[in-house]
Structure formats: structure tokens, C-alpha cells
Amino acid sequence: MAFSLVVSIPNLSSSTAGICTRRRRFFLPSSHLLLNPFLSLPSDRSSPFPFPEASILPNSWRRADARAGSIKFSLSSRPEYIPNRIPDPNYVRIFDTTLRDGEQSPGATMTSNEKLVVARHLSRLGVDIIEAGFPASSPDDLDAVRSIAIEVGNQPLGEDGHVPVICGLSRCNKKDIDAAWEAVRHAKKPRVHTFIATSEIHMKHKLRKTREEVVSIARDMVAYAKSLGCQDIEFSPEDAGRSDREFLYHVLAEVIKAGATTLNIPDTVGYTLPSEFGKLIADLKANTPGIENVIISTHCQNDLGLATANTLAGAYAGARQLEVTVNGIGERAGNASLEEVCAFNVKMLLVHLLTNRLSKLASDPTLQDFSVLTILKFTILAQMEQFDIFSVKKLVPLDSNHIRVSLSFFLFLQVVIAIKCRQELLGGLYTGINTKQIVMASKMVAEYTGLFVQPHKAIVGTNAFAHESGIHQDGMLKHKGTYEIISPEDIGLTRANESGIVLGKLSGRHALRSRLLEFGYDIDGKELDDVFKRFKEVAEKKKRISDEDLEALISDEIFQPRVIWSLGELQVTCGTLGLSTATVKLMSSDGEERIACSIGTGPVDAAYKAIDSIVKVPAVLKEYAMNAVTEGIDAIATTRVVIGGDETHTSTHASTGKAICRTFSGSGAAMDIVVSSVRAYISALNKMLGFVSAMKASEDTPKKHNVSS
């Protein structure tokens, strides 16, 4: 979604350096303007905002025939989706591969239902393409991708009516391509993404094929995908960062002729530096025959910590699709992070380049004193593309001719100015990402995968907007722009409690739901009842529930797999006088209760053994970690575990083609560390049992078809 802005200003006298009336159109992505109430009125998407009457303008600007200028804005959709080209050359498509490459992180396995929930949110986030999985890896993955294609790929979930492309990955062979097409063909805009390695080391040691064979396979398989009816085909030369340039030109030219619409250039092992990767994209753009008829994409791994830098370097050099994952998860050191790459969109929103004097205009929530002369000067500078921090400083202090200006207009003007400033640095690039959904996407992926975000992670880490140093705190109190280049509200992080509500044991459902809405959780019905029950249990033991406590409870209730087993009761005995014992009561999804007792080296070990004796499914604990949500003896504990099953729980690795044993993560939260540990273990078991049942269902399906035939 983008806003089209047309600016008209009055004719100016010679004292303004001969600037004349001009009209110019600016395109502003809607995600940049979500906080602006004047632009968000659903009933009026195109409205004029008149300038003041000429009588209050400075004398040097008055003319007998002067008429008020105006600023008009209207809503227009993001560029029309055409597989092999983008009508607006400044628009950059965001290709999210959290559900495919991100899930290849050890322990990051998600259930089909979890993938569907994440895909829904990615659609709300505004990503252009969702790589929903690797359908050939397992029947369960094929079903998950198909479900996403049917539901998310056919109906808009965001505010702008956008429906994302649904993509399936495949190796360059017919079996994989058939599976990918079967999974995604149900979407309104389906895409098949196929790849083969092109670096010498991969061709020699992994593929054991010659250059000629690789070119032939790539060309034939792209043509095969097109023959199935797929009109949107992405091709990736794996390990392009270490591939011979001339060979790359040749391979890519052949797949373009065969029908590829997007060429993805992967830095598969995170080997290149930003200058190298940018030059690679530029060289491909300049030397590959037919490349002007396709979209160039980037896919950068983070092995040397340069994924985001390389991705942006690729965009500067001409790439118009960027492949990313939420929280940067993925193989080995991960991928380019969606929130980091798209933070440059957020930076366009910032008005921190304005001075402290301008930031003090927020005392009145509806009307502000502001100088019309300054407003017009800002507008002129933006039109002339000469707006920078030095221009701002020249305009301070404000002129004496003040008028009452709507705060919404002031915010709107700030956005125009900031975007123009950032466009000079970013080349005018923008995306369709709704940045207000970033924090929720990060939390959802972290909880479902069990891969928690490190505190100092850029944009979404818990410390990203925390300030402990006295010098920093002093600066923040005086002006937030001193140490924050991005406002947390711009990415959907809200910490201020405007209603003044303090949650405690006397709080009701309405107060709890109101607070959850501030965090971005719009829940009701049974989900709200479950969270409220847990909230009351904690509130009875803690005088005041912190934001962190509440989010831990939300994660433990909302971001959980389908319930097969749930914890009923737990009793443990431990200490130095004897063996630890645990008694556990579990309830199955059909209401059956089972009780078991066991001994162990500690209370957690004893409880886990008791659970194993009830569930009767082999499981091996591979990872166990616990953290306190807040400080203090009454803090809530969050636990994360990773378990593995037997060797039958496998899937096919996309790059190597080898069968890999799946692992399953789970998380739990409680004030009692043993209860927290047990909840996490049951969560992981539910994931594993859900995967097993899905696999059995997939195996039984062809048998039923054979019987009926």
C-alpha cells in the first residue's frame, strides 16, 4: 500500500531564490503512515489540507493574485504483481522464508497448524512472497504448504487487501517440482522455487556433475515447471557467491530462456563482503542476457554476520526482491533478518533528524503552534530534494509568524520530510511491510520454534530499546532521539500504559484484555479464559503483574501446539535425604486422566520419567534451558526444551538431500520451576506426537484411495 502525495505551493518572490510554483508526486508506503490519524480516516481517503490564507503569510510571499496552495493525498495500492517485473522501479519485494529455511534451524520444527498461524501473520505483515516450505521433504510438509496456499494464498488478511504469493521449494528434479506445484497450485499467485549448485566445490564434491550437466538440468527443470502450468518460477544457483562469474552468466541466461521469472542469487555460506556482493549483483545485471526481463533477488546467509549488510548492498545494486526470515533464523548462523532489513523502512518514518525545538510541539494533543513559513520552507526543500540535517538546522529557531496547525498535518509533514531525507540515502527504495506487525511476528516465531531471541538482537531484542547507562538515560530524558534512531512504536512495541491500569489479583477480564490489546494480542473466548485463569493463579502469589510476566503467560497459553496431553496435577519430593520422587497426572485430549509416579536424580528428571511412562513414546532430551522473566524471588520461570524421537521421525534436507532426524522444541512458564519444566516437556511431546499422527495420516491416505479404486 502506498500514499500518493501531490504538493502545490504558492508562487514565491525573488527573495526565495527564485523558486516557482511546482507540483510533484511523492509515493509513500502505507506502512510508513499508520500512526497518522489524518491519513487513516476510512471514510475519506482523499482530502485537501488548505494552507492558511495569504494574509498571514510573510510579506515577502504575498502577492495580489496569490491563492492558497494545498496538499492532497490519496490511497493507491502497492504495485500490481507481475511475476517478472515491478511497475514501480523503487519497490522492493520481501520474500520471507521463515517457514522453509528458518525451520531448518536445529530444534525449530513447527507443526502444520503453527505454520499456518505464522503464514497468516506474515500476510498481515505485508510480505510479498511466503516460501511456505519444502513439500518434497515429507508428506506433512506438503500438506502444510497446501493448507497455506488454500487459506492464506486466496484471501487478504491485512488492511490493504494484499494477497501474498505462496512459494514451494524444490531441487532440480521432477519429483520435487511435482510436489512443490501440487502444494502451491491452489494459491491465487503460486510460485515454484527450484535450485541447483553452481560453485566448483559443490559441483565437484556434492553433485559430482560437470558444468554442462548442471546447465542442462537447470534449463530442463525450469522448462518442466513451466510445462506444468506454473507462470511464476524462481531459480537459484546455489552458492552463487563462490561461483565463476562467466559460468553464472551462462546458467542464468539459459534458465531465463526456459521461463524463469525471478533469479535468486544466494550467498549460501555467507562468504562475501558487502562490496563483493553488491558488485556481484551489478555484474549479473550488466552481463546476463535477458536479465532485464526478470527480477533479481538476494538470499544471504549470516555466517560472518554480514547477511543484512549484503542484502542491502544487493538492493542498492539493483536487486528488487530480498529473501529474509523473521528473527534471522535459519541454517547455521541464520539468514538476513526481516526486521533488520525492513528497519530501513522504519527509519524513513523517523523525525529524530528534527531538532529538540521541533519535538516540543506535543503538549496539545490536537492543535499545535507552528510556523507556516517553516512548514513551507520544509516543503520546498523536500521538493527540491535538498532536505538534510543541515537544512533543518538553518530553519531553527522558528519564525515568529505562528499559526494553529492540526497535529495530524504536522505528523504528515514530518513523514514527508523524513522520507525525502532517507530516500537520498536509500535511493528511494521502499517495501510494503507493515512495520507495526514486526514485534508480534518475532514473538510468534520465537515461541513456535523455541529459538528465543538474544537480548541484544537488533530491532526485536529485549535490550534494543533499553537504556541503563546514566549518560544514556540523561540523554533519553532530554530527547529520545539522542540514543534511539527508531521509535519502538514504529515496529509495534508498546510499553506505555496510557490508561494507567495496574494489573493485580483484583483485576477483571476487561482490564486484562485491554492490556493484552496494547501488546498486540487480540484474543477472546476460550483463549482469553485460559489466559485469565493463569493470570489469576499468578496474581494470587504476586502483588503486581509486570508486562514481562504477562507476556510469559501469553506465550505459554497462546503459542502452544495442538493439545494431545495436558498437565493436570504435579507433586514432587526432593532434597538431600533421599531420591527425588514425582507424581504426575496428565489429561488426554478426550478427557482421560492418567497418573504415574517415578524416581529420578532430581525433581525434573523424576517428573519427566513419570510423563514418559504415561505417554509411552520414546523421547530423548537434547536441550534444556531456563530463565527468570523478571528479577526477584517471585519471578516467573520460562523453560525451553528440545527433544528427539526415534529414527523414524525424519525429513529430507533441502540442500543435501539426506534424511535428517527431526527434533521438537517446547516452552513453558510458571512460578514453580518444576511446573515450568514439565509444561515445556509436554509442549515438545505434543509437537512430536502431532508430527507422528500427521505422518501416519499421510501414509494411510494413498491406501484409502487404492481401496476405493
Image (cartoon, rainbow, N blue to C red):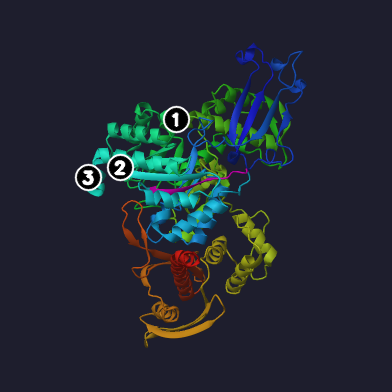
Query: Front-most of 692 and 593?
Result: 692
Cα–Cα span, label 2 and label 1: 28 Å
Q: Which residue lies furthest to the front in this view?
A: 709
Label 1 packing within 10 angstroms: few (<14), some (14-19), many (20+): few
In the rendered view, would you say 553 is above or below 500?
Answer: below
Residue bearing the label numbered 1 = 293
Label 2 packing within 10 angstroms: few (<14), some (14-19), many (20+): many
Residue bearing the label numbered 3 = 204
Identify which residue is drawn at 49% across, 42% down.
Answer: 94
Cα–Cα span, label 3 and label 2: 19 Å
Identify which residue is drawn at 64% across, 18% down.
Answer: 22
Residue 417 quadrant: top right
Please indicate whether residue 72 sits to the left or right of residue 548 in the image: right
On the image, the x and y values in percent for residue 188 come to 56, 45
Tell me the tag on residue 112.
none
Magenta-colored stretch includes residue 309: no
Q: Give the range drawn in magenta.
A: 160-170
In the rendered view, would you say 534 is above or below 493?
Answer: below
Q: Earlier in the sequence, mark 3 or mark 2?
A: 3
Q: What residue type is labelled 3?
A: Lys
Identify which residue is drawn at 44% across, 50% down.
Answer: 180
Q: Which amino acid does label 1 sit on?
A: Asn
Looking at the image, is mark 3 or mark 2 nearer the viewer? 3
Query: Front-most of 151 and 354?
Result: 151
Residue bearing the label numbered 2 = 271
- SS assignment at label 1: helix
On the image, the x and y values in percent for residue 348 come to 54, 36
